Amino acid sequence: VSLFLALEHSSEDAFHKTRAATLARHPEDDIPSLHRVKKIISDLSGVTSIIKDMCIDSCVAFVGPYAELDECPMCQKPRYDPIKLRLSGGRVKQPQQVFHTFPIGPQLQALWQHPDSARQMHYRRRRTQEIIEQL
């Protein structure tokens, strides 16, 4: 997890290469994969993404009135990978593209759990009080 946090402004490729280089030198170390690190962080923080299908061209998300559609109402491109759908006889419906949404509630709960971020979340109240006192 500390490797992931140290590379927070780097690409996923940088994480994979750094992990591989470390494991090449120290194969006995247990450095989790990126997928595992994200799962650990999600479990610790309680913040998880909601994954929804979307048009391959990003025209629409297949939610609400579009939830049951098999093709985009804007560009008519198929929702699911046509090759996998055909090869599976219509059983494997793998979306061509998805998007992740992170609900605000669990994010705020996670922020309130740490003293530093909880203090920062009181900034507006503190600053407003300072301005009132100056006036």
Image: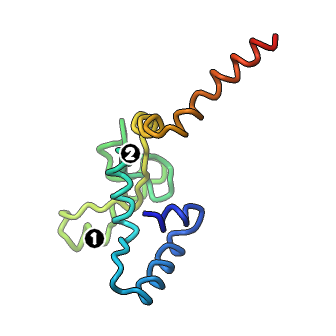
Cα–Cα gap, marks 2 and 1: 31 Å
Q: Residue at x 31, y 72 (%)?
A: 83
- Judging depth in this view, the residue of 115 and 93 nearest the camera is 115
Residue that mark 2 sits on:
47
Amino acid beneath label 1: Lys
Q: Residues within 10 Å of mark 1 (few under 14, many from 20)?
A: some
| Residue 113 percent location from the top left of the image | 43, 37
Q: Residue at x 48, y 38 (%)?
A: 111
Amino acid beneath label 2: Val
Residue that mark 1 sits on:
84
Q: Residues within 10 Å of mark 2 (few under 14, many from 20)?
A: some
- What is the number of the mark on residue 66? none
Q: Residue at x 26, y 60 (%)?
A: 93
Mark 2 and 1 residues: CB-CB less than 8 Å, in contact?
A: no
Can you say whether 88 is above or below 20 in the image?
above
| Residue 132 percent location from the top left of the image | 75, 12
Q: Does residue 14 appear to the left or right of 25 in the view shown?
A: right
Q: Residue at x 48, y 68 (%)?
A: 3
Q: Earlier in the sequence, mark 2 or mark 1?
A: 2
Asked which quadrant contains residue 29, the reply is: bottom left
